[in-house]
Image: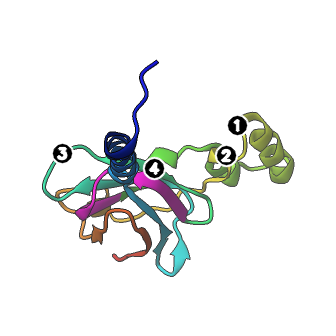
Amino acid sequence: MLRLGGFPATLLSLCILSTSACSKRSGSGTDVSGKVSFKGAPVTGGSIQFYPAKGGGSYPGTIKSDGTFSFKAIPFSGEVIVTVETESIKYSAAEMLKQQKGGDPAAMQKMMDSMKGGASASAVYVQIPPQYANPKTSPLKETLKEGSETRLDLVLKE
């Protein structure tokens, strides 16, 4: 059995500790949460994406029925362009129930929630200006700091 003592053992321990500390720190990302509103009311469904301003991929997520969103460890930092779109929920179960004539909407909603797990079934379409859906035209620009928690209140305008 090989036995290390003194300086070599201390040096080996320091190397292992510094490597593990660095690996935990790198790639920690940025936690982002917030709310999306339009005309003073929450945007009650759709998707939100973060694009690094310097180019590269994007990081997509979902807007909940109360207008909130939450991301853990977005893998980039710095200036980002944010897009918001709601067209994807235009024909959601909740929206179809809202437009339905006759029947019991509450009973239908309960049934749809149980079938879909509740999240997407409760989204109600809110029409927003199309400029917010495209990273080339979206006026939403934010700065994310690596390893931090960022709270964004995104107020969309006509």
Determine which residue is flagged by label 1: 116
Name above or below for residue 40 compared with residue 4: below
Residue 134 makes an appearance in the image: no
Residue at figure coordinates x 70%, y 37% from the top left: 116
Q: In the image, what residue type sits under mark 1?
A: Lys
Q: Mark 4: few, some, or many residues within 10 Å (few <14, many ≥20)?
A: some
Q: In the image, what residue type sits under mark 3?
A: Gly
> Which type of secondary structure does the marked residue at label 3 adopt?
loop
Q: Earlier in the sequence, mark 1 or mark 2?
A: 1
Q: In the image, what residue type sits under mark 2?
A: Ala
* Residue 9 point in image, percent of width and height: 38, 40
Asked whether 36 or 12 is in front, the reply is 12
Q: In the image, what residue type sits under mark 4?
A: Gly
Residue at figure coordinates x 82%, y 40% from the top left: 111
Determine which residue is flagged by label 2: 121
Residue at figure coordinates x 37%, y 44% from the top left: 6
Spatial CA span between label 1 and label 2: 6 Å
Q: Which residues are magenta?
A: 68-83
Side (left or right) of 70 relative to 113: left
Nearer the camera: disc 4 or disc 3: 3
Q: Earlier in the sequence, mark 2 or mark 3?
A: 3
Asked whether 101 or 13 is in front, the reply is 13
Spatial CA span between label 1 and label 3: 33 Å
* Residue 89 point in image, percent of width and height: 52, 47
Nearer the camera: disc 2 or disc 4: 4
